[in-house]
Amino acid sequence: MMQSTLSRGQRVALLIALMTLITSVYMLTYSGRMGYTDTRFLFDATESLVRDGDFLLDLTNGERRFWDYEEPLPQVPLVPVNAEPLQIVMAAPLYLLADMLPNAGYVHVVWLFNVLVSALAVGVFYLYALQLGYGERTAIITGLLFAFGTTLWAYSKTFFQEPLTLLLILLAAYFVERWRSSGYRSTGNVIAAVGVFVLAFAARRAALVALPVLVVIGFPWLERLLAPLWVRRGFFALAGVTAIGLFVASRLPAVPFSDALHGYFFSIGGSLWGTSPLVLLAVPGMWVLAWQNRMRYVIAALLMTLIYAGAYAYGAGDEWFGGLSFPPRFLVPILPFLMLCALPAVDYLTTPNSKRTWRIVAGVLVLYSLWIQFNAVSYWWGEYTTLLPAEARGLTEWRGGLDNVRYLRWVLLPQLWGAEPFDFVWIRTGQPLFPVIFGVLAALSAAGIWLAWRWPRFARYIAITLPLLAITSLYGGMRLIHSDDLYLAFSGGLNSSLDMIQREMTADDVLLISQPGYEAFYMNYGDINGPRVITLPFHQGERENPDAVPVIDSPNPARLLERPTIQLINTLAEGRDSLWLLSHSSPFITWSVRPVERYMAQHHYPLRTFDLTGEDGLPVRLIEYSMATAPTQSLQGPQQTSRLQYGDDIALVGYTLPAGDSYAPGDALPVSLFWLSDEKLAESYSVAMHLAQPGGGVIASAEDSQPRAGFAPTNTWAANVPVWDNRALRIPAEIAPGEYELWVALYGFNASGEIALLDVTGGNSAENGTIGILPTTIMIR
């Protein structure tokens, strides 16, 4: 084992160059894809923390329901993220940074988190190797193998919590090792170790099971206790018996977590050694360490593997695989401890005296590991399930895919090469300059490692220059990939909605997205100072396409919606005057049921509609509602009666003013009209409503529409069955105080397409008897 002969400045320069090199390569395969539910929740909580000071899920509300939570918040009944807070808190500065940088997407910037965390973890590993007495060459080479030959590379593309947990547990162990190496005199290292381990627990509660590993690393007399050869032999015999016991348990169906034990320890496609074959270098490394009576890290690595994997196998239950992820997701924090045991093997293999046979075997192992990891980063992991046979039922944890060579991920995924582009952001966004930038940065970082090693005078310049180049490259890269169609960047309607939101809404407003889909745009491009955006689930009363049959078909809009959506809307109605809805559809898409719009039109008051659909045809409509509670029962009579008759068959029997008859400038004025027809109507008429001065002069108008926002057209009315029609107008801010009138008209279109107003009789009217005047005076204060 070669000891370090370099200066402190050289070692710092090597550390910086190593982390910059790893960051550069990770960026070449960076995707910025929110393809996994857990990571979407974590990002959503990060956004909520920065914008609203809480950990509630709003943008992903459509993916996680809140009925299982006993105490939803009264004003915004959203569920908390139900995850450890540290990663959310640590990622918040990246979200703030994205808000300050022009042309930088929020998701794209926040998804740099694990790129940086993983590179930092390799940096800590490098320092750890030096602390254990290995030379820079061994530390750097093993660090590079750790970075690119294990699933750490795959998880650098995600926002999962495992890389941060890995970093913090490794860092805590590093401080414990420094404390032990100082002869237990360095109080600062003890404090640092405890503090970092508390952070690890805040990053992932499962980190608590790593505490015995830290005890082993710091235990004072361990080598003395294990000095007798028979003790070490006894330890390995115990390890062998434990392995046999685990194998037997993994084969017994009666053991409830046998699938997890099999996947974690023995499967060729799901275990640590199966997905990161380089960790097998720990086996000869452990033999060397045992022979040298340096058993501390042999015990630490095996204990970490046993208790960490065992805890997840037992505690995670059916969720042991970790969802749509690359296996074994939950065991990623074990990797550095196995690689620490691999240090003696790498140290031997990189010396001129090593046997050629062992170098060839190690070379094959390295190439195989690189093959696995490249396949792990080449495509979104959901693509794998599309390549599995029908018997897998789309399950990523299917045993056939974990045990059968034919169905291993790195065997199936290459079938997509050439047929589908790699899941790299620069390919998806068509930015060839992106890989050039990070390819050059990688080359400069590699050159920096060589220069810092050979010429100490360059170390200072490398330590200063490379971080500046890395920051510049990251910023330039983020600008290049800003327009990403994965996040609907090219939707004219959604981009127009941002301007509309800035102009019409405040930070106190709430914008509901009628169903999942469009929230991706607001995740990446939504303004930090805008309203709270809440995504509603896809409802069983909606159609996904013209040929689909809704799961629920009912004339009652409440039955078409998920119960939590109704609770959400009702709770929001209690605390605010208005609510905004972003609709995925329009009245011109006749097959769409639009259950949320139906419910809102029946229970509240459509105020304004902005049709923002762009040339791309993606339907985008913003609708503002007055949240006054409307009368909903046909048998519930109106507060005010009316004798207005429209044409021969339609009567405005009465109306209700739920907010009364006195208003201030700028208020919404909601009105519920109570219609009745004594005959089945053939035509569909539209309703116009105005606020006017007595004697003439329209001051403000509601939007014209067929009754109940178009969901109750007159040609669908049954004879002698009353219909409620809710609509509202905004009183102008500059209106003068005084008395005003409400005018209501019904109109259709003649054969030439011109508006044809129905004559009004039976009450007061205006405009030559074509507009009815409601018998209530509106007072403007």
Image: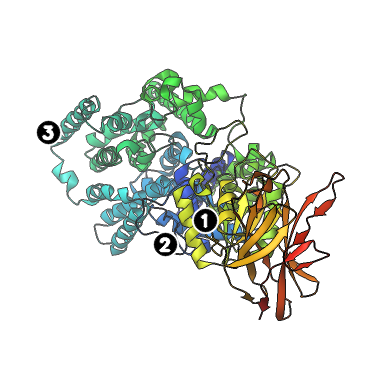
The secondary element bearing badge 1 is classed as: loop
Between 223 and 159, which is closer to the camera in this rendering?
Answer: 159
Residue at 36 percent of width and 54 percent of height: 69
- Residue position for label 3: 230
Mark 3 Cα-neighbour bin, 10 Å: few <14, some 14–19, many ≥20: few
Label 3 sits on what residue type? Trp
Residue at 59 percent of width and 32 percent of height: 422
The secondary element bearing badge 2 is classed as: loop
- Residue position for label 2: 73
The secondary element bearing badge 3 is classed as: helix
Of all residues, the one furthest to the right in this rendering is: 752
Locate residue 663, reporting x and y percent.
Answer: 63, 76
Q: Nearer the viewer, mark 1 or mark 2?
A: 1
Between 456 and 256, which is closer to the camera in this rendering?
Answer: 256
Mark 1 Cα-neighbour bin, 10 Å: few <14, some 14–19, many ≥20: few
Residue at 42 percent of width and 55 percent of height: 79
Label 1 sits on what residue type? Gln
Label 2 sits on what residue type? Leu
Locate residue 283, reporting x and y percent.
Answer: 30, 31
Q: Nearer the viewer, mark 3 or mark 2?
A: 2
Between 457 and 260, which is closer to the camera in this rendering?
Answer: 260
Mark 3 touching mark 2, by CB under 8 A? no
Colour scheme of the picture:
rainbow
Mark 2 Cα-neighbour bin, 10 Å: few <14, some 14–19, many ≥20: few
Q: CA distance from mark 1 to mark 2?
A: 29 Å
Of all residues, the one furthest to the top in this rendering is: 406
Between 151 and 251, which is closer to the camera in this rendering?
Answer: 251
Locate residue 138, reporting x and y percent.
Answer: 41, 39
- Residue position for label 1: 633
460 is higher (above) or lower (below) than 320: below
